Amino acid sequence: MADETGAGGETPFWRAKSLEEMNPAEWESLCDGCGRCCLVKLQDEDSDAIAYTDIGCQLLDEFGCRCRDYPNRQAQVPDCVRLTPEAVRSLGWLPPSCGYRLVAEGRDLYWWHPLVSGDPDSVHAAGVSVRGRVGALEDEVPLEDYLDHMVRWPLRLPRGALRKSAAVGSGAVASKGTRR
């Protein structure tokens, strides 16, 4: 968990503000860069149950775990969901580690979140991101094969992500990630 106060003794913005009160830079920084929300999800027509796949959106950078064309994503991928405070509160498929979801639920960000660790690579070092776990991108897999790519790991946190690692938390990990 983050310290009780941020730099200079101030309460971090994600504890002091509601999602609606955040400015655009604060809002965007809530994304930890895990890429889990960019995995294709399947919804059962009868039960509405959601199942994750290891298939990434066609715009997902599999190494950086960010969108390769974030400003134009919705023009290129019409079913890309734009997160808003209302959407965050209603989407049942956001990963349990999602910074937006955590703040909406009144919970704190995990130690590996870049806002807490100060290191954009900590999400990868903690094993939370999709780096190395994407089976294919959606434009590489025929629709009839999607069921073969169903996985459960996006809804789970690795054990290491639940406890603070001194090496990662201290900023000792080299930063290679990209920012949103």
Image (tube, grey):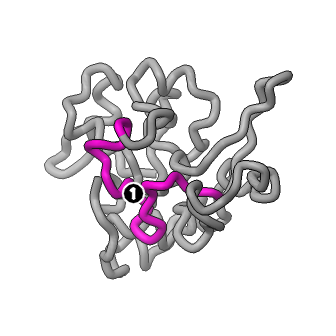
- Residue 109, how many percent across, how many down? 44, 46
Please say if 127 is above or below 17: below
* Kind of residue indicated by mark 1: Arg
Q: Can residue 163 be seen in the rendering of this structure?
A: no
Nearer to us in this view, 116 or 88:
88
Please say if 101 is above or below 114: above
User: For this view, does 56 lie left or right of residue 11?
Assistant: right
User: For this view, does 60 lie left or right of residue 90?
Assistant: left
The residue sitting at the left extreme is: 8
- Within the magenta stretch, is there residue 67? yes
- Within the magenta stretch, is there residue 78? no
Which residue appears at 32% of the width and 76% of the height? Answer: 176
Nearer to us in this view, 28 or 132:
132
Residue position marked by numbered label 1 in the rendering: 66
- Residue 130, how many percent across, how many down? 55, 63
- Residue 35, how many percent across, how many down? 49, 55
Find the magenta span and give its range. 55-75
